[in-house]
Image: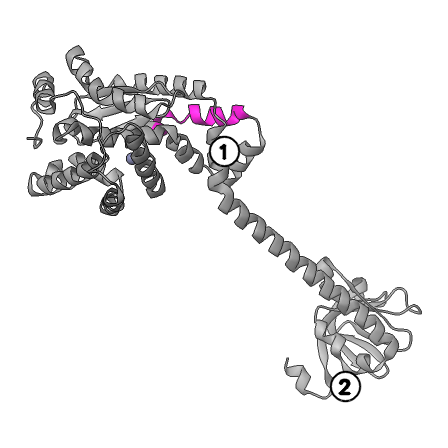
Amino acid sequence: MIEETRPANDMRYQGGAFHPDLESGKASGTVRISPAGVCFDSPNGRFELPLEGLQVALGGANDRLVFFTHPDRPDAAIHTADHSVLKHPVLAARPELTAQVGRVQSRQRHARVLVLSVIAALIALIAGVVLAKDRIVESLANSIPTQWEVSLGNTLFEQMIRNEREVTDPDLTARLRKITDPLVNGINDSRYPFQFHIIEDPTVNAFAIPGGHVVIHSGLLLAADTPEEVAGVLAHEIAHITRRHGFRSLISSLGLYQVLQMFVGDATSLLAVLANNGAFLLDLKFSRDFEREADAVGWEYLLRANIDPGGMVEFFKTLEAEEKKTLGGLPGGTEKTLSLVSTHPATLERRHTLESKLRRLDRDGAAFHKFDLNYDSFKAGLRSKLHSAPEGTE
Ligand SMILES: [Zn+2]
């Protein structure tokens, strides 16, 4: 913009020209505007287009160049990428040119407005899709036929249980049903055939497989003190199943493009993706939002089954006590024994949320379900069936 401080006649713009007299018909050089006309200068030659009858237009890629032509010289053209040439006082002083320049500038403005509108529309579209992704994911997950989900869950469970030691003692599983039957009957969700399995593992953990299988580690059952605590954990796990958190996590982990493609496409591609990612569904770490949702839905399930939700809160305290115990114990065992705490982030925040819910509940007036189970004797029975003595669960 140094040129603008010079006298108008001296203003030079970098540019180029087409002319038959120039070597190879074109050249790069400088463009100058004078009262006589538009002048092109280059080492290969110079020529001028008279101001009288001069035509101004935009051309080149994206209308990047300003072109000067003249009807008397149809084989010649001068151009510059410097659009400030349009503000040159000589051009501005000629009404017929100003009109042309005005048209050129309004075309530029329109082009700019158009580009900006397209960009704004794209940004709005992307933002909308990103915001709507959770809803799209949920509606995709809800479009999966439950029967299909149940049979995939059965396959996944069979794959998983092959590497585990399941406690199948009929007396123990019958006693576990004293906890699970009232819960499942109370929830009364006929979509899923819930099945509960105990596996021999000292880790304080439980997890849900899409379709209805809930796997409980022996370590969790031994760490709990009451059937209400176990019911609290199981209600949470059941909520992961009914809210289809496994499928929703898997679908969310895919790129936005693939999600949209599945959303507009038929169900086969979605089901193929889910079926091919069984390992993902078996080794899930749910998001904080899904954990909060499982707490809230699980809480409602407990109330629906008339089970004291205080057990859910108590189990969080058990977890925290377990955490302290493990931290004071062998450093090697820390990571494994804490897996429930670490896979369920922000445990403390979740406990506080449930505690404030519990305070609002009129528990004194409530006659909660009394489990027909001696929990200590159940634990003793379980302990006697384990192959190795569990650590730190006394
Ligand atoms: Zn969970």
Q: In the current view of this chain or complex, which residue is farthest to the front?
A: 365
**Amino acid, disc 2:** Asn
Is the CB atom of the residue marked by disc 1 within 8 angstroms of ligand 1's nearest atom? no
Is the CB atom of the residue marked by disc 2 within 8 angstroms of ligand 1's nearest atom? no
Say which label, 1 or 2, has the lower sequence index: 2
Q: Residue 281 placed where, x, y %?
A: 35, 28
**Amino acid, disc 1:** Ser
Q: In the current view of this chain or complex, which residue is farthest to the right?
A: 72
Q: Is residue 57 above or below residue 317?
A: below
Q: Is residue 171 above or below residue 257?
A: above
Q: Residue 266 placed where, x, y %?
A: 57, 26
Q: Tell me what residue is drawn at x 19 percent, y 15 percent.
A: 173
Can you tell which of label 1 and label 2 is closer to the viewer?
1
| Secondary structure mostly seen in the magenta stretch | helix
Which residue is label 2 attached to? 9
Q: Tell me what residue is drawn at x 50 percent, y 37 percent.
A: 136
Which one is nearer the viewer's eye here, 46 or 236?
Answer: 236
Which residue is label 1 attached to? 139
Could you tell me how far apart the alpha carbons at marks 1 and 2 are, in whole angstroms?
A: 68 Å
Q: Tell me what residue is drawn at x 64 percent, y 79 percent.
A: 1
Can residue 9 be seen in this snapshot?
yes
- State the extent of the magenta-drawn residues as a range: 267-281
Mark 2: few/some/many CA within 10 Å (<14, 14-19, 20+): few
| Res 337 → quadrant | top left
Q: Is residue 1 above or below residue 228?
A: below
Q: Secondary structure at mark 1?
A: helix
